[in-house]
């Protein structure tokens, strides 16, 4: 797994070939931030060691829709890239990994067919991040629109056993609101599973980044707070080093 030391990972969420940030994952709440490649290059220039890409149209529609933008980012940057959104099959994942994506993020597909995690991991170890998005303490899927009734910790343990390289945990209750993070769910996950926990959701300032590291996260994905200029990537990374 890539996170040898704690990383602040910029999010490049793509909708209609533009960078957007949503509030609690809801369509119609998006703020737009321009060209995805320019955003990706900016974060790499500022010191990002990993980029977190999400094909939002793919996440909502169940089929990848921003392949061109993703490919342009892969061609333009030379850091690790993890990609989620609309990856539903082993074939989807294999094609992306062959194309230069370092890790695929599986959400809905991992919930609906857990064995897919083991199948992809067996072929390319260390390549699968399972996304567990929690709303009111339960895992949600289909672009955060449907509850599964699953407990995030129990789910994380299951996917660790299946070979997942990391768990991406997003707290939907605070996602995109820049209202501060909730560390307790992250702490619980970090204590119960022995693969890295990547935290996401609610980061408003550098103190939130530090708090997630202290809760046991191996990395934190930051979107809105970086795009809105609450702090720089360099400031955040310096705070945790």
Image (spheres, grey):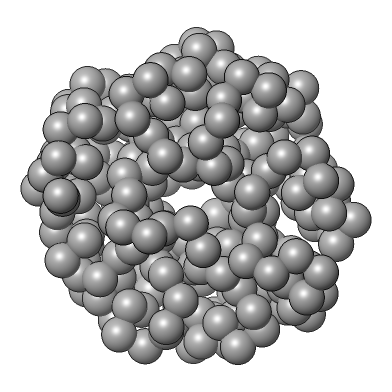
- Which of the two residues, 161 or 184, is positioned nearer the viewer here? 161
Q: Which residue does the image show at 48% across and 57% down from the upper left? A: 2
Residue at the limit of the structure toward the right, as seen here: 91
Note whether residue 19 is visible: no
Note whether residue 167 is visible: yes
In the displayed structure, 137 sits above or below 82; it is below
In the displayed structure, 142 sits above or below 55; it is below
Q: Which residue does the image show at 42% across and 70% down from the upper left? A: 196
Q: Is residue 197 left or right of residue 58?
A: left
- Which of the two residues, 41 or 152, is positioned nearer the viewer here? 41
Give the total number of marks visible in the rendering: 0
Q: Is residue 212 left or right of residue 59?
A: left
Q: Which residue does the image show at 57% across and 17% down from the upper left? A: 37
**Occupied quadrant, residue 189:** bottom left
- Relative image position of residue 110 (x, y in whole percent): 69, 69
Q: Which residue does the image show at 57% across and 25% down from the upper left? A: 77
């Amino acid at each position: 797994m890539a996170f040898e030391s704690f990383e602040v990972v910029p999010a490049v969420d793509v909708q209609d070939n533009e960078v957007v940030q949503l509030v609690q994952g809801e369509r119609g709440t998006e703020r737009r931030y321009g060209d995805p490649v320019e955003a990706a290059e900016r974060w790499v220039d500022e010191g990002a060691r990993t980029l977190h890409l999400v094909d939002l149209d793919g996440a909502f529609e169940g089929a990848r829709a921003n392949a061109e933008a993703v490919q342009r980012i892969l061609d333009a940057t030379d850091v690790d890239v993890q990609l989620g959104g609309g990856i539903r099959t082993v074939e989807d994942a294999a094609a992306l990994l062959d194309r230069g994506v370092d890790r695929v993020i599986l959400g809905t597909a991992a919930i609906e067919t857990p064995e897919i995690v083991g199948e992809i991991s067996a072929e390319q170890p260390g390549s699968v991040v399972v996304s567990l998005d929690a709303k009111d303490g339960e895992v949600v899927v289909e672009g955060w629109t449907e509850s599964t009734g699953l407990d995030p910790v129990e789910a994380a343990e299951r996917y660790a056993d299946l070979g997942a390289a990391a768990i991406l945990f997003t707290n939907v209750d605070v996602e995109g609101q820049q209202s501060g993070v909730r560390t307790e769910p992250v702490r619980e996950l970090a204590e119960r599973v022995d693969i890295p926990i990547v935290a996401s959701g609610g980061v408003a300032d550098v103190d939130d980044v530090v708090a997630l590291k202290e809760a046991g996260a191996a990395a934190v994905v930051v979107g809105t707070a970086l795009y809105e200029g609450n702090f720089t990537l360099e400031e955040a990374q310096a705070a945790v080093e």
